[in-house]
Image: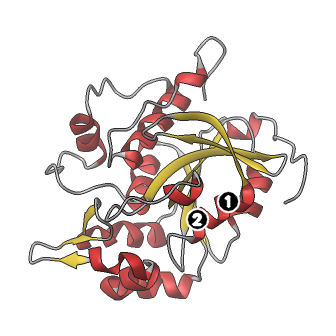
Amino acid sequence: MLRDGKHPEYFLPEAVPGFCSLTCCMGVLNYFWSTSFNGQNTWQMMNLFKEGLYTGTEMLDLPEIACKLDQLGFNIDYYLSYSEELHRDSLENPTKYIYERTPSQYHKYIKTDEQGYYRDSGTSINRLGDIKFDQKIVDSQSIIAHYDVDIIQVIKENQREGCLFLIGLDRYTLHNEQPYEDLPGGHVILASKIEDDHIVIFDPGPPLLLYHRVPVERFMKAVDEMGTYYSFMKITDKHADLAPFFPVSSTP
């Protein structure tokens, strides 16, 4: 994690629209290691996380991020709001799972093609083949998967210096904004702790919001807005056990 004199308030850059997940990954690298491996633009950084296979089209999803950060040496705990049985079933029936986990108002954006691409929102494109990253989480000896969890409880029990949570949610609900027509609100942020009934987030935007406090109730609505199931991850480095816990000052 960042040490004295490293200006931690500047660890997260502002995202190019559509690249919030990648920008959060850059923030993780900066927060813990003060580096983005000299990546000068989003193409270079996406190629790092796609291992040179980025075509300029597909985005990063959470299981893929978890596997890459694990490969880079971070400690990753991967949390799912649903059962291990359902997670394994989603590996066998990925298209069915995409529809089940996606809110009905976004179903019109779901499309697949013969190359194995699918869209699960108006702006995000992934490969159905990337379901392999979910399989890697199931099989991994280093990524710890937790099922049937409550995100608020997990954050409260684990919040400490040197620990970040990477979370997908709906940006319109998070910021109490009216949605733009035909522009879904799927978004990825980082968070650090809960205090005084608010969660402290780092939102790559645009616009960039650092150490931004959001009421826990609205945060949970933003998480639930993304569908029936959700997942998120806790990211720490090898020094995390030495860091003090953040106290929870009140209970939502």
Disc 1 marks a residue whose amino acid type is Arg
Count neighbours of disc 1 (C-alpha within 10 A) and say few if under 14, some if 14 to 19, many if 20 or more. Answer: some
Task: Identify the residue at image location x=56%, y=45%.
Answer: 190
Can you give x and y, in whole percent of width and height, for residue 227 in the image? 50, 76
Q: Is residue 251 left or right of residue 48?
A: right
Task: Identify the residue at image location x=79%, y=55%.
Answer: 157
Q: Quadrant of the N terminus?
A: top right
Task: Identify the residue at image location x=52%, y=44%.
Answer: 74
Disc 2 marks a residue whose amino acid type is Val
Q: Is residue 37 visible?
A: yes
Helix or strand or loop: what does disc 2 sit on?
helix
Q: Is residue 145 visible?
A: no
* Residue 46, image quadrant: top left
Q: Is residue 244 left or right of residue 132?
A: right
Can you give x and y, in whole percent of width and height, for residue 77 in the image? 59, 58
Q: Is residue 159 left or right of residue 185?
A: right
> Which label sits on residue 223?
2
Q: Nearer the viewer, residue 40 or 85?
A: 40
Residue 14, compared with residue 216, is above or below; it is: above
> Which label sits on residue 218?
1
| Residue most extreme to the right | 250
Of the two numbered discs 1 and 2 on the same chain, state the one appearing first in sequence: 1
Residue 188, compared with residue 151, is above or below; it is: above
> Which label sits on residue 169?
none
Depth check, mark 1 against mark 2: the one in front is 1
Q: Is residue 25 left or right of residue 32?
A: left
Q: How many marks?
A: 2
Task: Identify the residue at image location x=59%, y=83%.
Answer: 83
Can you give x and y, in whole percent of width and height, for residue 135 in the image? 39, 73
